[in-house]
Image (cartoon, rainbow, N blue to C red):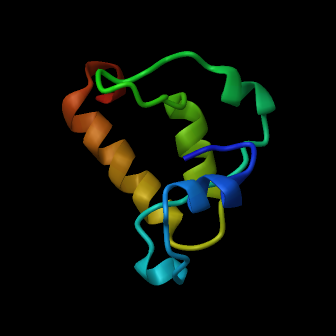
């Protein structure tokens, strides 16, 4: 997730801080602040970050995230014709 104030959002969601090896939620402040102004939403009303931004962050954030980026790219290659090349 992207938020202007990750700690406040985590508190509001009642998330518990854990180590990277056991976390399943990541809240970060995007390098490009205009990302927070994006008005694209899922069917259930959750805001959506651009896929390119998500992949860039997964590939550049420290930790295990490069593996997750690879999994996402593999999934897109199997399910999205634009990514199958």
Viewer-closest of 49 and 16? 16
Instruction: Tell me: 4 left or right of 22.
Output: right
Q: Nearer the viewer, residue 76 or 3?
A: 3
- Asked if 19 appears above or below 31 in the picture, the reply is below
Rendering coords of residue 78 (x, y %): 20, 36
Q: Nearer the viewer, residue 37 or 82?
A: 37
Residue 31, image x, y percentages = 79, 42
Q: What residue occupies the far top of the structure in this picture?
A: 39
> Can you give x and y, in whole percent of width and height, for residue 57 in the image?
62, 49
Q: Nearer the viewer, residue 36 or 69?
A: 36
Residue drawn at point x = 51 percent, y = 62 percent:
66
The image quadrant of residue 22 is bottom left
Where the C terminus falls, by quadrant? Answer: top left
38 on left or right of 14: right
Q: Position of residue 30 (x, y in %)?
A: 72, 43
Q: Which residue occupies 29% across, 29% down?
A: 84
Quadrant of the image occupied by residue 70: bottom left
On screen, residue 63 above or below 75? below
| Residue 6, placed above or below residue 73 | below
Residue at 62%, 44% (x, y): give it.
2
* Count of marks placed on residues: 0
Residue displayed at 46% across by 82% down? 21
Looking at this view, name the residue that lies furthest to the left.
78
């Amino acid at each position: 997730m992207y938020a202007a104030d990750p700690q406040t959002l985590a508190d509001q969601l009642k998330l518990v801080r854990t180590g990277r090896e056991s976390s399943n939620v990541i809240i970060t402040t995007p390098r490009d602040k205009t990302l927070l102004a994006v008005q694209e939403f899922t069917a259930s009303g959750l805001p959506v970050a651009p896929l390119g931004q998500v992949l860039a962050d997964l590939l550049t954030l420290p930790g295990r995230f490069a593996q997750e980026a690879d999994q996402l790219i593999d999934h897109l290659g199997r399910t999205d014709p634009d990514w199958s090349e």
